Every structure is written in C-alpha cells, then in structure tokens.
Amino acid sequence: MAASGGRDRVNAGTIAGNVAAPPLREAQPRGGQLRGAPVLRVDGLRKRYGNAEVVRGLDFAIERGECFALLGPNGAGKTTTLRCCLGLIDPDAGAIELCGEPVPRAAREARVRVGVVPQMDSLDPDFTVTENLVVYGGYFRLPRPVIDARIPRLLEFAGLAAKARSQIRTLSGGMKRRLMLARALINDPELLILDEPTTGLDPQARHLIWNGLRQLLSQGKTILLTTHFMDEAERLATRLAVIDHGSLIACDTPRALLAAHVEPEVVEVYGDDARTWADSRGHALSRRLELAGETAFCYADDAAPLLADLATRSGLRYLHRPANLEDLFIKLTGRELRD
Amino acid sequence: MSTSSVLRPPAISTRFVPVWRRNLLVWRKLAIASILGNIADPLLYMLALGYGIGSFIGNVDGMPYVAFIGTGMVCQSAMFTASFEGMYSAFSRMHVQRTWEAIINAPIGLDDVVLAEWIWCATKAVMSTGAILIVIFALGFGHTWHALWILPLGFVVGLCFGAFGLVMNALAPSYDFFTYFFTLVLTPMLLFSGVYFPVGQMPSWLAHIAQVLPLKHAIDMARPLMLGRAPTEIALHVAVLAAYAIVAYCAALVLTRRRLLK
C-alpha cells in the first residue's frame, strides 16, 4: 500500500486546482445539479433526550461556498444538531435536506458528498498516513485509481507529503488533525463539516488548519463548523449562528451581528479597585458595564470619556479594544459557567 | 433515537465489505504473531495433556486422547478467538480508537459496521481453526476429507461467540467488564462441553445442562468429522448454534444502536 508516485497529473500542484477539481472527479449524481439550492437546510429541528429537549426548533440554511459557524456554549446542542444533519440520529421533529437529499431517509446517499472531521481524532493507529486515506476512501467505494490519484495532493494540502509512510503514533497533534482534514476530503465533498476543528491545538497548529480551511473556501467548498473559539469564527465564518439551550439566538454575518448587538468599543478594567471604580464612575461613563471577578467590562459607543477618567487612576490597569465576537457571545449567552 | 428506530430490523447490505477488509488489513500486519498465538497455546495443551494424561487413559470415544483433546481444542480456540475479537478488539475500535465513529460518518451505516465485525469474528475463528487443524494433521491425526468440514464449523462457532462478544461490547463501560464473560460463560463452557473429557462421564444432571451449551454441539460435530464420519443429529447441532448466533447478533445490534445512535 504505497502512494502511487507515477500518478502525478498535469495539475501543477496548486491545492486550489487539486482539491476543487480533481481530474478524476466521479460523476455527481442528483445533488450536483441543484445549483443555487442550499447545501444544507434545517427546518424546525427538534431533538429530545428523555425529559430534556436539547434542540428546540432550529432553522438555518447554508448556501454554496459559505463558511457557516455554529457557536454556542457547551451543551448548547451543536453536536446533536450535526449528528441529526448527518442522519446519525433521528430528529423528533423538523426537516433536513443535505446535498439535496432528505435526511435521515436518504442520509447515506447524502453522506457520499459530505466530509466530516469529528471532534476527537479517529485515525487508524495500525495504518500509515497513506493507508488511513486509502482505507477511508474505500468506505466511499471510490475506485483505487481515484484514491491513489488524490492522495499525493491531499497530503501536500495537509503538509504531510513527507509523512506519507509514517505511523500515526509518530505524528504531532496538529499533524493528526490535518490528516483528519485530509481524510474528510478523500471523497471530494461538496460540504465539509467540522466539529470543533482546533480544540486542543497550539497556536501554530491552529493557524495551519485555518489556512487550509481558507484555501478550501477559496476553491468554492462549503464549510459548516462548530466552535466555541471566537477568534476561529471571526477568522473563518462568512455567517454565524449563535445557539443556546437548543434555540437559535442570532444568525447573520459577524459584522452585522456585532453592529446589531454590541457597542463598538470596549474597555476592560482590572485591579482590586475595579469594583469600587465601577460603582463610582464606570457605570456612569459606560453604556453597559459587566463585572466578572475583579474585571469590569465597559461597553461604549465612544470610549474617550472612560479613558480620560482611567488615565487619572494609578491603581487600575485597563485595555481599550474594539468589540469582538466574544463580547457578542457573552452578551447573548451570559457569563455563567456551563457544565 | 426513538425506540422504534433502535428495534428496527437489521439493514444488511454488502456495504459491510470495506469495513471487514479494514480489519483484515490490520490483521495482516500482525499476522505472524496472531498465527503463532493461535497455534502455540493449543499445541502446548495437546502435547502436555494429550500425551501426558493420554498415556494413562489410552483411547477415548474411539480416538487417541491427544486427537480427542485436539478436536476439543479446535472448537475451544474458535470460541475464544471470536469472543476475544467481539469484546476486546471491537471495544478498541468502537470506544478507544473511535474507528466506528469515523466509519459511520462515511456512507456506511452502524448496522453495516456491526455486521462487518460479526463476520470478522467468525473469519478469525476460521483462521485459528485452520491453524490448529494443521497442527493436528502434522501430529498424524485427522487425515480425512471430512475433517475439512471443521473449517465451516469454526465459522459458525465464530458467529455464535462473536455475537456474544459483541453483546458484551455494546454493554461494556471498560475492558474490565469482559472478565464477567470469561468467568461466567467461557470457563463453564470450556469445562462442561466435552473439550477435555466426554460429556457422558459427568453426572446425568450435569450432562443435561451441557445440552444447552453451544460449544458442546460444536464438539459433537467436530469429533466424528475428525474420525472421517458424518456426525449424527447435524440439524439439531446446527440449529442450536445458529439460534444462539442469530439471537445474540440481533441483541448486539439493538444494544449497539442504543449505545451509539443517541
């Protein structure tokens, strides 16, 4: 089982050309003709476990070419929603259409055109890097020449070309994640679903994954990802949905959501006296102020008066920054801990 | 997942083949160790008990004791191999490595995965059956075409105990849980099914209990086959083994769906 060296195609090796339009792309059945139709549409999705309703009437649609992020605290219903969309669990109510197929009824047909990167790595430790891709391609019934033609490009895309024959246990955490991503692309999917793709990775490894995902987007792939990293959503998502307690709280482009829900400027004030300061001056100078431990978060349309006041106080440290998705997230889902 | 979807009939298709082949590819990498393990253990038992104890007792049920115990070892080995595969190996793939999760994200259903694992358990049972048959042939016994029927018999034994193992797998919180199955099921099965001595030697109440043990029915077929004769009551023996296998497979499927599809 070796990467077929002789199959390098005319394609000069830009990943864009490689993954988006492999020369041996298999004929796409029905879904491919549905240009303009959403890649995934979810209407009124409900799912109950025992007495707890985990998903409570969720609606959203993902258009071709966009990167749609599902944000939500732990237990918000993100993973349950993904599992319903893939047809792995049956919803209690609602309709799902994935790549033009009704789910769960035709979930298997839909999954032919979807790539999935689950939360936890699930590489085969007994196989080499290349063998992992070969075996996974077999689950899609791809002919061996098609798989062999795709593997060198996928390895290059994942920065693993030098690791083709390596054992999985010799890979770093970031390499394993990139191989998971490459594996999810073996069937040249229309939609890539990633469940918390960079959890547990160091900053360098996260940036490599983000670069890879951006390349895929620039080739026109559609991506659905869940995350609770706001910087991840900020960097990648063209549109995002915040869900909490199984319901959709907000759904729009990151910019529009920020404009609609959060004041543009934030001043974070730290120190033992932050609370006293907040009571005496902070509340009056902010449109909105939140206390978390010894930190005061001051939200304002114009931070100048806040900064002028803080400049006179020696016992306080502060940080002035523009509002970001984390502020949005906290505003919409609250500060209390979720377990 | 609603109750009805957990209890629906098995969705059987050829989609299980790539999953079965995946297990075969992994096995190929470890094949030598695996085959040695299959042969060494029973070979030692056959030599020590067969020739050691055999020297006191001579022929048992019309065959030298070493051949008698060797035939028992074939069936016992099919039983252990399939049980082990259905428990420890399947648990590694399902729980530890998350291999099953990866597979059902592709266009393959959980039913296909369970079917593949079941058939794989039986496949490994056939491999160990074959390995021990070769040892028995090498020792100069069972030189008869009938003995080759023990290979498909090993497959059926593998289906039976592989399904038992997969039931345990679906229920197991950790590897430790499988000890129950060894203590409560496999050890009694080994001692009272006629591997080491004829079931007829036991008190009649115990011999009656042995009638419900699937391994006993496998051995009842294997011994005559080793002597070059057709077994009696083939339909009964096959029916008992098949019934255990099918009921346990269905239970394993329902319990696995309940565990993973929610």
Image (spheres, coloured by chain):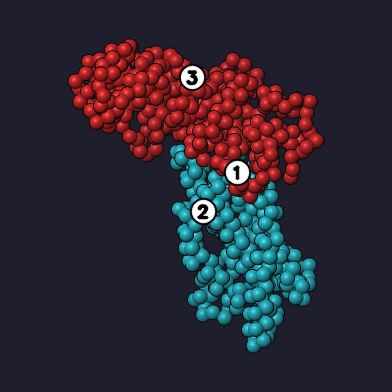
Q: What residue sits right under mark 1 in the picture?
A: A171
- Going by the image, does B209 lie left or right of A249? right
Along the viewing direction, whichever of A148 and B111 lies nearer the viewer = A148
Disc 2: host chain: B
Along the viewing direction, whichever of A135 and B214 lies nearer the viewer = A135
Residues at circles 3 and 1 in contact by the CB criterion of under 8 Å: no
Q: What secondary structure is found at the residue carrying circle 2? A: helix
In the rendered image, the vertical position of residue B166 relative to residue A13, given as above or below: below
What numbered label is drawn on residue A239?
Answer: 3
Q: Nearer the viewer, mark 1 or mark 2?
A: 1
Q: What residue sits right under mark 2 in the picture?
A: B169
Q: Tell me which residue sits at (47%, 45%) in the image.
A: B258
> Residue B220, position in %: x, y?
64, 70
What numbered label is drawn on residue A201?
Answer: none
What's the CA distance linking mark 2 and mark 3?
Answer: 42 Å
Residue that sits furthest to the right in the current view: A6
> Residue A177, position in %: x, y?
57, 37
- Going by the image, does B141 lie left or right of A157? right
Q: Which chain is red?
A: A
* Location of residue A75 (image quadrant): top left
Q: What is the drawing colour of chain B?
A: cyan
